[in-house]
Structure formats: structure tokens, C-alpha cells
Image (cartoon, rainbow, N blue to C red):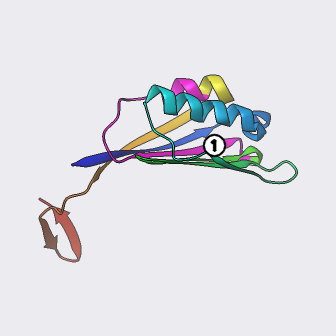
């Protein structure tokens, strides 16, 4: 059995959009609805003072959804971990449309829960 984790970075975003909590809430709502995720309570949000960014966290029965925005760097970091595989989501076009991102990086990680055989070569472990 395995899960999946997406680590997403967006750069060149409009600074004002990264300070817009409602825009981030709508992003979370779309991800949750589109991927049929199940929330455990309401999302928690923290807006940093002045021209600071926002941190958001939503606990899911499948794991978590988190974001951090950095208006001063025009960047957004997003992390979604699901303990079971999920369909792909259109992170790149959505972040370009919603936040004006000029560049988006999406890394998808398979999270394996079972012990795999490991062979040690020198001081580096290599999976079989």
C-alpha cells in the first residue's frame, strides 16, 4: 500500500493574491472537492502582520493540505499528502490562473508504507 504527496512551488505570483485568505480558501475548497478529500474540522489560517503572507493547514482524514505564501518573494508553497492514491490535479494551470504564477514546479512523491529490502553499498542504502 502507498500514498501520494505533492510538493508544489509557484513563483512570480501577484503579491496581493498571496495575502488574500479568501483566494487560498477557495484553492483549498477546490482541491478538497475535486479530489474527494474528507476534512477533519475547519482549516486553520494565520495571516502574518503587515505585508506578510498566510499559512494555512487543513487536517484531512487522508492526511493534510498545507500552504505558505511569501508575498515579498512572490511565491507560494503547497503540500498535499494523501494516504491513498488520488487522481491528478491541475496544479500548474490553477496556480497560474488564481495567483498569476509565472512558473510552477510540481513534484509527486509515492509514499510507501511497507518495509522494502535495502542493500547497503558503502554508506549509502540502495532499494532493491
Residue beneath the point at 54% across and 35% down:
104
Q: Position of residue 42 (x, y in %)?
A: 61, 45
- 120 over 18 or under it: above or below: below
Picture quarter containing residue 14?
Answer: top right
Residue tagged by mark 1? 76
Q: Is residue 83 magenta?
A: yes
Picture quarter containing residue 21?
Answer: top right
**Residue most toward the right?**
50
Q: Position of residue 2 (x, y in %)?
A: 25, 48
Picture quarter containing residue 29?
Answer: top right
How many tags in the picture? 1
Mark 1 residue crowding within 10 angstroms, few (<14) / some (14–19) / many (20+): many
Q: Is residue 96 left or right of residue 39?
A: right
Question: Which region is colored magenta?
Answer: 73-95
Camera-nearest residue between 14 and 86: 86
Residue 109 in view (yes/no): no
Residue beneath the point at 15% across and 61% down:
116
Residue beneath the point at 75% across and 44% down:
71
Classify mark 1: helix, strand or loop.
strand
Q: Position of residue 26 (x, y in %)?
A: 64, 30
Amino acid at each position: 500500500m502507498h500514498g501520494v504527496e505533492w510538493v508544489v512551488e509557484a513563483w512570480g505570483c501577484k503579491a496581493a493574491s498571496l495575502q488574500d485568505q479568501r483566494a487560498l480558501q477557495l484553492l483549498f475548497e477546490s482541491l478538497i472537492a475535486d479530489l474527494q478529500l474528507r476534512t477533519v474540522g475547519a482549516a486553520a489560517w494565520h495571516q502574518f502582520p503587515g505585508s506578510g503572507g498566510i499559512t494555512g493547514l487543513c487536517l484531512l482524514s487522508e492526511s493534510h493540505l498545507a500552504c505558505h505564501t511569501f508575498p515579498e518573494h512572490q511565491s507560494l508553497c503547497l503540500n498535499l499528502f494523501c494516504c491513498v492514491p488520488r487522481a491528478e490535479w491541475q496544479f500548474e494551470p490553477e496556480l497560474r490562473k488564481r495567483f498569476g504564477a509565472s512558473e510552477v514546479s510540481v513534484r509527486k512523491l509515492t509514499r510507501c508504507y511497507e518495509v522494502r529490502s535495502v542493500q547497503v553499498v558503502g554508506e549509502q542504502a540502495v532499494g532493491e
